[in-house]
Amino acid sequence: MTETVKSLPGGVFAAIPTPMRDDLSVDHALLAEHSRWLLANGCDGLLVLGTTGEANSLSVTERIELLDRLVADDLPAKRLLCGTGCCALPDTVALTRHALANDVGGVLILPPFYYKNVSDDGLYAVYDQLIQQIGDTRLRIFLYHFPQMSGVPISHALIERLVRAYPATVVGMKDSSGDWDNMRTTCERLPGFRVYAGSEQYLLPILRAGGVGCISATTNVTAPLAARVYADWHAPDAEAHQARVNEVRGAIESYSAIPALKFLMAERRGLASWRNMRPPLMPLANEQARELSARLARLRFPISARSTEQS
């Protein structure tokens, strides 16, 4: 395995939400601040411009500026996985080229998601065209399997075909399907392929199956807990650490993911602007916000400006 592949670490990644000002423009300073907090509190790396980051509600110009500003704020580029997948192939090419220019550790690429029921041949052609047009040996692609959101699954047959054709380029996947059998099968069929579970609730199982970590929205708040699992996954108490992660994750995922997460960010910082998001997404309803706060309180999981879990 080349040094470039190693530059994107395994472990706990947070899929970062994009903070927005009241006019719904990106709050770059707050994004950099939160990113630094995550890296100091258990995260091995960060996913920017993913689903949680509302990437598909941002223009190509905004996505380019977001990455530029984040790297300019001295965030370590090699610890960043950048979402660059778009419906239009030229947009994906432009964003991927820009990510490479910023020397990120890898790019996470959704399949084109507007057209449904497309063939594996059609999806293969998209990735093939992208790789050929980029023409850069630094390119490291992580596939993004999230069929319940994209409506376009990435089959094992397609993954194997891409890896055979481009073994040094198509190097891993974020599996956000929630389908443990699919994750395990990918690890079994493709040893060495860098599989990240899309939820920290699968962190211990994916590591035991041969995967490399998790990339999750809720690790924005559970990173210190998930980091314990990753650090001690060979230890006798790994199951207990994983159980603690699962109960907190379970409370949060009972609500719409991005609104719930942005509410928790607002609570942690005492900053109401964290709840801002672009339509069609809407903030978590006040009643649901109170319920979520109460559930986390019962779990003795505090969310405040200074808290990381101590118990």
Image (cartoon, grey):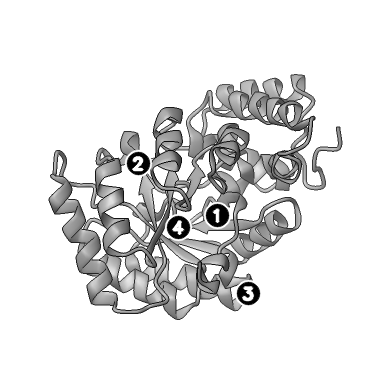
From the viewer's perspective, is the residue at label 3 or at label 2 nearer? 3
Dot 1 corresponds to which residue? Answer: 19
Give the quadrant of residue 205: top right
Mark with earlier residue (3, 1): 1
- Mark 4 or mark 3: which comes first in sequence? 4
Between discs 3 and 2, the one toward the N terminus: 3
User: Toward the viewer: 279 or 184?
Assistant: 184
Using the numbered discs, state the Cα–Cα distance from disc 2 to disc 1 in whole angstroms: 16 Å
- Percent position (x, y) of residue 22? 52, 54
Q: Quadrant of residue 261?
A: top right
Q: Foreground residue, 291 or 240?
A: 240
Tag 3: residue type?
Asp
In front: 254, or 21? 254
Q: Could you say which disc has been placed on residue 49 in the image?
A: 4
Q: Is residue 231 left or right of residue 126?
A: right
Q: Amino acid at mark 2?
A: Pro
The residue lying at 25 percent from left, 48 percent from top is 158
| Element marked by disc 1 | loop
* Badge 2 element: loop
Circle 1 or circle 4, nearest the eye:
4
- Marks 4/2: CA–CA distance: 17 Å
From the image, which quarter does the C terminus lie in? top right
Mark 3 burial class by Cα count in 10 Å: few <14, some 14-19, many 20+: some
